Amino acid sequence: MPFNAIPAEDFFNRESELHYLKGLSELKKNALGGDVFLEGARGTGKTELLKQLYRLLYWEGDVVPFYYSFKTANLKGAYFAKDYFAGFVRQYISFAKKEPLIAQGSAEPFERLMPAISSLGLYWLIDCIEDFETHVNKNDFYWQIVAAISAPVIAAKKSGKPVIVMLDDFDAAASLYESSLGDTTGLISLFRESMQNSLCPHVMTGSAGALDAIFTDHSLIGMTEQMRLGPLPEDVAAELFGAHLARLKISPPPVEEAKFLAVLKGNPLYIRNLAKAAWKMRKKELHEKDLIECYSFEVSDGETAFYWSSVLSRYMKTAEQRRAMLKILMHSFENQGFDDVKRLSILSGVDETETGAILAAINVSGIIRDKDAVLQDFIRCLYMKEIEGRTAVYAKEKIETKYLSEKEESCFELVIPMSSNAELVVAKAVEQIGKNSNLDAEFLNYLQLALIEVCINAMEHSGSYEKKVFLKFITRPDRLEIIVENSGKPFSPDTRKEIPVEEKLRMGIKRGWGFKLVYAIMDNVKVERVNDRTRVIMTKNLKDKEVLE
Amino acid sequence: MKPVQFSVASKLVGDAAVIYPKGYLNNLSGESLVNECGIYIGRGITKIVVNFSETDLINSIGISLILQIMEDLRNIKGTICCTNMSKFLHDTFEMLGLIQHMIVFPSESDAIKYLKAGTP
Ligand SMILES: Nc1ncnc2c1ncn2[C@@H]1O[C@H](COP(=O)(O)OP(=O)(O)OP(=O)(O)O)[C@@H](O)[C@H]1O
Ligand SMILES: [Mg+2]
């Protein structure tokens, strides 16, 4: 219900949007517009903006606010009609009497409201209720829905007071059905009449991909203006996070350690959840590593994870579909793309038709429109849990290590083609990276050698179709970490039996020195398999002035 | 790291061939090194000096091709000496446990002297 809006002073940075929406009924009266499709990434605050608008209109009294959420609605038509109609009647009376409680008592039968309606002199509303009940009693499916949807219009006409109709997560209305899911299409177009009425501006929310999908009727798109709700700017985001922490009595992170918050990309939902996670984890003060820890908890097992799970399950009903979607999402993140259905199908092992269908659903859901690192981390965790059978704790730790090791200023990435001498580009790059960190020149020669070996190993043995090697260098004061990744055949150096040099020479075995060098040069070498990729992780501890013993 | 182009220069000093691999010693350049040695071996030369003064960088394929040359010479009872190896190159062979199977001299002239002394 719309009354649990956050205090106006805690609502950041949406003054102009709020101001504009407040003026909608004026605009509509003057035929300058009036219906708005409010789109934005998940959690950017679409619902909150409606709630704020609602509260404002409610207490000002010139325009009647009506809010309906399709997110949690039962989409069986008859049920929806009752819910929508009852919601409107209650909210209307509540508005007229300025008694918020009336709007919240959803279990109360209409008869109980009659005295209030009479005392307000809203006789037309009594007619309206009677008409609706007649349709219900006659079991007239279609007219029940029409009567419910047109209730705000009737109210506006009878009273002369405009009604702003707020339809939250309106894209779900495309799935309204008669008796079983999918049996009827186009019930959503019954909103058309109501939307065209000059006394009833509509504000609908939904994901970015949804608008075209809902309005198959193009005359409706034409009338509807799109408003995009963007992320909070960086400074406002920091301020919001600080405000949440202050309320939870947690000291905020020092400015230079708060850079990590950029990963939340100004999303108020993520910001709030992170602050709450800090509280759940009983943090009293926050440093960068605490932020990373709380964040990793959030995406693996916290409220953010729960939020995204429920969003995904709205689009993927069965466990099987969900697993297929996970594989596809994971592969498209790793390979930076959703375009090539055939390739995604091969990589994920999901057949092509299903891959196509899942991609379409992903597209409509709008979840991947904006590159969302939080969603990607959530998907990674879910993949580890559901596909790889890992625990939530394991997933959390993986995410943690990823961020702890990746401070942007000390992280370099490079992609090379699998072609001859490409490894020299890597050698050159690592030389400069090493120089930037004042590493000893001779030591750098060894580092170059180790990298060259890993690269040529990838080029020679992977049989990869992608024909690319991905490298990442992370420098820290005490340690250098290099990650080399490529798709193709698995490779495991441990399975190679160590043959003594003499034996090798006697038998004329000349190859196979590469990884021996890598092991000798680096302090730690791990070879992992991540999906269809081989990942070699090498670390070297840096002593005062690195010289090889 | 200096230029990466690889080329092989060589000359004959008495009955020994001196070969100068240059640049980055990998599969491509290693092959031409093997070929160059092959030409001398074909002409009946059994003493080869590989002067590494101009080799900047090497990879394991380059290493394996040097082992190939060592083996070719062993088969004809010849001798191969390596000279002017940088500390890096020397340590690399050492890391692999190969250095004790090679005849290494600080300079080319030392190697030539050694090979002459070995001549009956
Ligand atoms: N401008 C803002 N300032 C402070 N908090 C905000 C702001 N906008 C949203 N919030 C808070 O962020 C959280 C997420 O907002 P909300 O649920 O409105 O997002 P949404 O866009 O409707 O998400 P969904 O896509 O799931 O429907 C809520 O707790 C809300 O109170
Ligand atoms: Mg919402």
Image (tube, coloured by chain):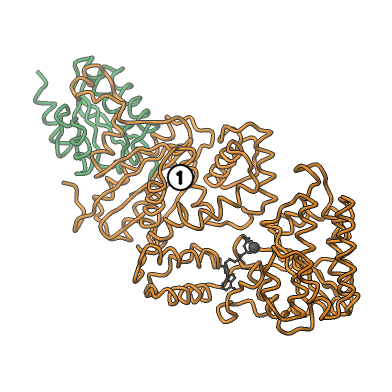
Chain colours: A orange, B green
The image quarter containing residue A61 is bottom right
Three-letter residue code for mark 1: Phe
Q: Residues within 10 Å of mark 1 (few under 14, many from 20)?
A: some
Identify the residue at horizontal 27%, vertical 24% (top origin): A497
Identify the residue at horizontal 34%, vertical 71% (top origin): A284
- Residue A236's spot in the image, x, y percent? 53, 76
Depth order, front residue of A3/B108? A3
- Residue A492's spot in the image, x, y percent? 35, 31
The total number of labels drawn is: 1
Residue placed under numbered mark 1 in the picture: A470
Vertical side of A338 occupied by A466: above or below? above
The image quarter containing residue A214 is bottom right
Vertical side of B37 occupied by A436: above or below? below
- Residue B29's spot in the image, x, y percent? 37, 33
- Residue A364's spot in the image, x, y percent? 70, 50
Depth order, front residue of B92/A264? A264
Q: Is residue A543 left or right of residue A281?
A: left
Vertical side of B14 occupied by A446: above or below? below
Q: Quadrant of the N terminus of chain A?
A: bottom right
Q: Is residue A168 left or right of residue B21?
A: right
Vertical side of B63 occupied by A154: above or below? below
Ligand 2 location (quadrant): bottom right
Q: Disc 1 beta carbon < 8 A from ligand 1?
A: no
Q: Which residue occupies the extreme top position in the image? A: B76
